[in-house]
Amino acid sequence: MGSFKEIHLGLTRKTAVDDARTFLERERALKGSACALGTDHLAVLRLLVKKDLTGAFEKLVDANPFAAVTGRLCAEPYAETQVFNRQSERISVRAIERFLADHVKVKAPTALARSKQKVAIIGSGPSGLMAAWELSKKGYRVTVFDQARMAGGSLAYGWPEFLLPFEVMEQVVRFFTERGIVLELNTIFGRNITLAGLKDAGFKAIVLATGVGVSTPLGISGECAGGVMGAVDLLRAWRESRFGVDAMNTFLPVGKKVIVAGGGLAGLHAARICVRLGREVLVVLSGSDADMKADAWLVREAAEEGIKFKTFMRPEKIQEDASGCFKALVCRPVDYRVDKEGRLSVVADDETELAFEGDTLIVAAENEANTLFYHTQPGLTFKEDGSLVLKADSTSTELRGVFAAGAVAVPSIGLLETILSGKKAAADADHYLSA
């Protein structure tokens, strides 16, 4: 049984201050992009060097209330800059960001309510919470609704605790509620609440930010066999176990040998959970490991933990045993070829089939936008992939006063882009309400 304790330890105060000072010495030679969220990291570092930790943290979270999360999971700002400390270790601005979020305990600043207008956010994931944060800064009275029993969306249910501890997410959510943002959990949009009902209750603008819901099927025969599950479902069941629900054994029992099909981030997380539970895990990819939709360091850690990867294998069908349960994933080898026109294409070996046997198959290709109950709401329109149709260069839906943010509009975006979309939706909603 592996440990579920957080893998990466944070910085000490001395190291954080020393690293900030050393990094600032290279300020005029920085390369790469600054923070996409607009965080002035150099100003934060200057305050930290002066040992004004509270001021540094307040400067940080004014632009990014997710500092405890982004400091753990996101790419480095100024990524092309190579600055090393006295221990010959590369200085990480993200690690310094995490240090401040983990060690400075202050309440979120409460925005003075200068507006009586109410705004509803549907979904408490990163895009929804960011929209709520920005709108609360502008004085709106914000209520966030979510169907789950814990706020945080994909951060709470999509990242295992050895990468993003449960307690850290509780701390982040508490920071939002201290701001005066109201959370209404265990509330399903389209059932418990509707667009019409929210408008009748006095909400002048609504932001839809329900993220992704289920794993996209592989589209091959046998996916209804017992022991076949989506990566998103396994991650959700694992998180539910924190509430005393033995979902992993009761609803989604995982066999001794697990096959993960697909290179999605959720699949990699599910694989790492399973290996910690003592399972043998094989990840089957249709391309190379470089094609995985996950940062290289996450893939490297998974390999170090004993997870095996089989690349350039395209799933063709699922074999079932006599009882109708998963037995093997049958694949064809694929390779990249250049055709006569010089175009790169994927070609399968139609004469070869390989069967990878196991007890459980986890499907982890793509995720679908969580818009199931949206179809009960008149006026919303959808793309072929199930996501919402928005007006050009806007987060506005075709319904007046209704906006959308995050994966419900663009299912395949990353964490930073998801947070940014919440910020954009808040700006669009503010513009609409101020007109």
Image (cartoon, rainbow, N blue to C red):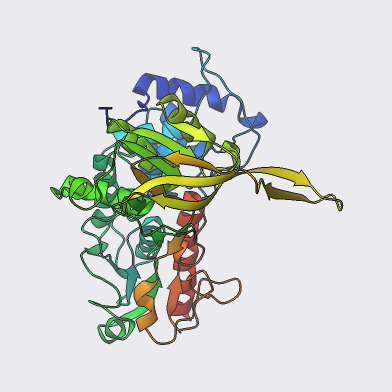
Q: Closer to the camera, 180 or 395?
A: 395
| Quadrant of the frame with the N terminus | top left
- Residue 208 % position (x, y): 39, 70
- Residue 432 % position (x, y): 47, 78
Residue under the point 28% across and 46% down: 169
Residue 113 higher or lower than 238, as above or below: below
Q: Quadrant of residue 18?
A: top left
- Residue 273 % position (x, y): 32, 37
Q: Quadrant of residue 47?
A: top left
Residue under the point 54% across and 46% down: 331
Q: Residue furthest right?
A: 340
Q: Quadrant of residue 265?
A: top left
Residue 392 higher or lower than 178, as above or below: below
Q: Is residue 163 visible?
A: no
Q: Is residue 366 visible?
A: yes
Residue under the point 66% across and 34% down: 31
Q: Residue furthest top?
A: 87
Residue 15 higher or lower than 425, as above or below: above
Q: Closer to the camera, 268 or 322?
A: 322
